Amino acid sequence: MTDAATSAALKPPARPLGQWIFDVLLWGGIIIVLTLSFGPAEIEKFPRLFSGSDNMREFGRAFMNPDFDLLPFFIAQMWLTIQMAMWGTVLAVFIAVPLGLLGARNIAPAAIQWPVRRLMDILRSVPDLVIGMVFVVAVGLGPFAGVMALALNTGGVLGKLFSEAVESIDKAPVEGVRATGAHKLQEIAWGVVPQVAPLWTSYALYRFESNSRAATILGLIGAGGIGQILFDSLNSFNYSRVAAIALVIVVAVTLIDILSQAIRSRLI
Amino acid sequence: MSDAAVLSVRQVSKSFGSRRALDAVSLDVARGEMIALIGPSGSGKSTLLRAINGLAPIDKGPGRIEAFGGAVQAQGRVDRDVRRTRIRIGMIFQQFNLVGRLTLFTNVAMGSLGRIGFLRGLFGFWPAETKNAAMAALARVGVAEYAGQRAGTLSGGQQQRAAIARTLVQKAKIILADEPVASLDPVAARKVMEVLRDLNRADGLTLIVTLHQVDYALRYCDRVVALKAGKVVYDGPPQGLKRKQLIDIYGPEFEDVFWEGAPQ
């Protein structure tokens, strides 16, 4: 056998043509879509970030001088927002526990599991702002509409997370409980729930963190709390007040994050 | 079924896909017997135990399992009232099957779930009788001092003894033990086997124990039933298990299933 033949046999593997074509189509497609979206997304306005300096200067000056005259009021409204987030999350847990169990492959028969999963999908996919507006119509302006919006949306999210936790349990302890002659519900209470409790609590706390941010936004549709004050001040161009409110929100949300993370890290 | 019989297995088959785990197995168990169920891995030992308390449904057909004169399963269907029968059949598993995050006490108190009120059981308001029974059972198997510790933090031998205590609180008349010592070191294994034999001798409980180690079958049991490929190939006293029978069951490498030397 000649040297040439040996080296030919050891040629590095060539990339198949199909992969080349796929790459070209994928990246080419992405570039085309981005180009087409350039106009509608008004990317050409990018330089205005730096040229509209008069407006920005006024906004920035006011922002540097936050107006804390109404601080006790802001704090009271922030507390109201947190109260909305707490009730929204707790009600969501009450929705999510039965949904999470009935939607789990290893607990519920397929005939129940499927509709429960679709219900959770619907709850999750409708933004809380939209649910909130429906409830504003139903129960009037105010925090309760916001609480219900958070409860339903978070109920769907937590239900999904809860059922994934249930699906990953060890089934041996459940069988141990079953072998004592326990009722099916007792099997779940003693065999399943203790296994998922730390994860469930952690998910619920995490959702409480994001709900205290979401509850702020819900002020936009008249659900009360700090968010509503924020948007009112923004609409009346009172940027000093906006700055003060934003600071209150940042501090409060950060504190909640720190507290909840400290609790969650103990749980797992 | 004779008067003293507590358990009867008749023509029971169980398939997993095309594989027959149990092939027309019949077995009669009298009250107070201590039976070792032996056989190579995959011979159907665990499946038989799980079928006896209705955890695994058997194939359709003539197969029938009765305990205490009532059906556990027949015609390939687990009886609707199986929970009532299960209460009197305790089960011990190779991996203990305790709930690791709950205390030993709670795990053992769960033994009473089948006979206390539904809501009391659901929310864990254990009656005084359960509490006393749980502590007495933990003391009997020698782990009462760990009652307040999470089950998952204890050694395998301690967990297995707690699992036995759970069947005591259950007031089970039959105990099915599925490889109870396979995950334990020799000292812990011997302790567990001694607790099981004491329950048989002192309390008159009926025990069926699947064992990997034939030594234990010979030392602790009065009757040995051997399964091979889902069929009963030996049913008799341990003294009858000679070299020839062991080769029938396990093949020529049968010495491997002894810890302390096989009979010649």
Image: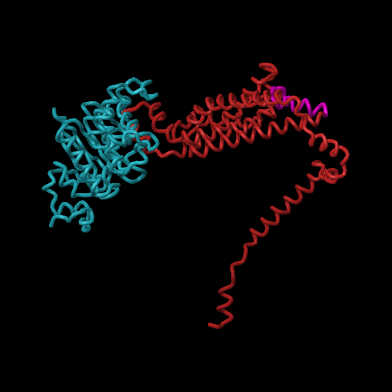
Q: Colour of chain A?
A: red
> Which quarter of the picture shows residue A20?
bottom right
Q: Is B10 colored magenta in this rendering?
A: no
Task: Name the image colouring.
Answer: by chain
Which part of the image, by quadrant, shows the C terminus of chain B?
bottom left
Q: Nearer the viewer, residue B246 or A198?
A: A198
Q: Nearer the viewer, residue A249 or A43?
A: A249
Residue A96: x and y in percent read 53, 28
Which part of the image, by quadrant, shows the N terminus of chain B?
top left
| Residue at left offset 33%, top offset 46% | B19
- For the question of whether residue A8 can be seen, the reply is yes
Tell me: A261 left or right of B42: right
Residue B150: x and y in percent read 37, 37
Residue A261: x and y in percent read 56, 38
Prevailing secondary structure class for the magenta stretch in the rendered image: helix
Whether residue B98 is situated above or below residue A97 in the rendered picture: below
Residue A159: x and y in percent read 54, 31
Whether residue A84 is situated above or below residue A160 in the rendered picture: above
Q: Is A228 colored magenta in this rendering?
A: yes
- Name the outermost residue toward the left: B239
- Name the outermost residue toward the bottom: A2
Q: Which residues are magenta?
A: A219-237
* Chain assigned cyan: B
| Residue at left offset 59%, top offset 25% | A88
Whether residue A55 is situated above or below residue A141 in the rendered picture: below
